[in-house]
Image (cartoon, rainbow, N blue to C red):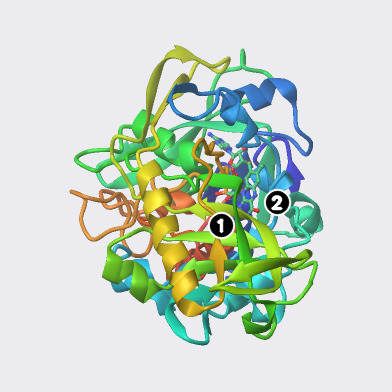
Amino acid sequence: MILNQPKHRHYDVIILGSGPAGITTALELSKNPALTIAVIESGLLEPHPTIQTLANVQLHGDLPDDYFPMHTQRCFGGTSTIWGGFCAVLEKRAFIAQAWPIPYEEINRWYPAAARIIELPDDAHRQPVVSIAGTSELVYKPFYVSPPVRFNKKYHSFFQHHPRVDLVLGSTGLRLITGGRTVTALELRDSQEPQLPATSLSADTFVLACGGVGNPRLLQISDVVGQMPVGQGLMEHPHLYAVAEMYLDRDRLPVGAEEDPQIVHALQLSDSYCIEQGVLSFSADFNLQQMTPTVLLGKRREMLHTPVTIRAEIAPDFRNSVGTGDQRNYLGVPTPRIDFHYRYRDLARESWDLFGKALLRSGLGRPSILQPEFRLHDGGHLMGTTRMGLTAADSVVDSNCRVHTTDNLYVAGSSVFPAGGASNPTFTIVAMALRLGAHLASTLKGNAHG
Ligand SMILES: Cc1cc2nc3c(=O)[nH]c(=O)nc-3n(C[C@H](O)[C@H](O)[C@H](O)COP(=O)(O)OP(=O)(O)OC[C@H]3O[C@@H](n4cnc5c(N)ncnc54)[C@H](O)[C@@H]3O)c2cc1C
């Protein structure tokens, strides 16, 4: 049901946040018929200007002033109400290097179901690394484009009619109440009537799905931090639009690289070449529209001529962080402080340099030089702030997305990504939320009472 107030005082599972991560976790959890579930959402069915100010942050560093709140939406459906729909599976490289503490197959097996949720073509879950004849240094990587699915529209009727899953709108989670390793309750405040006293709601299990800033903030405010690097290692995908040009031999592009409104074509350094060269990955998008006469290796010929957009990977850097600011929002909660600096400009150049040489060696084409004064744009992909790992010394959640220092608190969303690759995150967020929902649905018994 869709409600303004919780129907029960206790649920089996409370999920905080109704973006792709929260909704997908609820969908999968609801398959256990013994569980009552509440999804608590700060916003309303439609965006509300006052509630949206809860997404404000104090920004220090390189992100533009309008980055927040533009990049996190406080309403039912979360940021899926404005996302662009670009999707690709994560590269295997970060799993081979054991940055992720789970095998790639653990995520890969959930991609087909995730593809159905975000309405991608059947092929979208396959590793898109199609090799290019004559080189092991480059791969062709299609990005699949979701319609884009707006989770609020698609799942409105699921929440409206489901007897055991309540969507509670207009309630903001203030902090978690804990006793030892157990989270016992969530303190809530009405997002529209902040003068009303805070209320609390108890549950056996809690899932934070409040985005890359909201998740670490809830842990920090609730003092669930200990030695864990909560809020540290914030990653983005810097986007460099039309930063260079490429000439490509259209006849040597892999079969399938054809005009298709659901595919954006890209070339990428292969995983093995990135590992060999010790560089981070990036993808170089190209389009198929313009053929131009040019000279390649001394021969004049007709080639595909395309502007290039780069989507770059950055490494986690614990100095890029989410912490506590010195102001308060209208609910009385300290505003997040974000410190973020791009430190990888040279790496983008280095990777592009390697990419250009690999392109020439392969005979597939040639690039122009990268514009000397390129401007980095951000992608709105907030990753890494409650990273997954083996121990509380260097990570926040374990391989099941449970916060190390608790027995019943889980995190959903790209904040758990220990490495972000060069793929947009939402496909993986949905796959991981399905995995978390299935894990909880199979382990929880359910005993809620009203
Ligand atoms: C302009 C733009 C374009 C994008 N394009 C793409 C793209 O092409 N491909 C891609 O993969 N990704 C894209 N993204 C990123 C994508 O939108 C996010 O990865 C995705 O929405 C994250 O899902 P989430 O559920 O983790 O978080 P969100 O969607 O941010 O949802 C979090 C929810 O939690 C709620 N919440 C937060 N704090 C509280 C609290 N204390 N109490 C109660 N509720 C709370 C919020 O109101 C919100 O509804 C884009 C983002 C932007 C901004």
In the rendered image, the vertical position of residue 368 relative to residue 142, given as above or below: above
Q: Examine the rendering and report whether any part of residue 269 can be seen.
A: yes
Whether residue 264 appears in this view of the structure is no
Q: Could you tell me which residue is drawn at 63 percent across and 80 percent down?
A: 253
Tell me if mark 1 has few (under 14), some (14-19) or many (20+) residues whose alpha carbon lies within 10 angstroms of its own.
many
Helix or strand or loop: what does disc 1 sit on? loop
Find out if the beta carbon at label 1 lies less than 8 Å from the nearest ligand 1 atom. Answer: yes
Image x and y of residue 324, in percent? 37, 23
User: Which residue is the site of mark 2?
Assistant: 84
Q: Secondary structure at mark 2?
A: loop
Type of amino acid under label 1: Asn
Query: Mark 2 or 1 closer to N-term?
Result: 2
Residues marked 2 and 1 touching at CB (< 8 Å)? yes
Q: Looking at mark 2, is its residue's CB closer than 8 Å to ligand 1?
A: yes
Percent of width and height locating residue 116? 69, 73
Marker count (numbered): 2
Question: Residue 178, how many percent across, how many down?
Answer: 33, 38
Residue marked by disc 1: 424
Residue 432 sits above or below residue 239 on the image: below
* Residue at 72% over, 76% down: 121
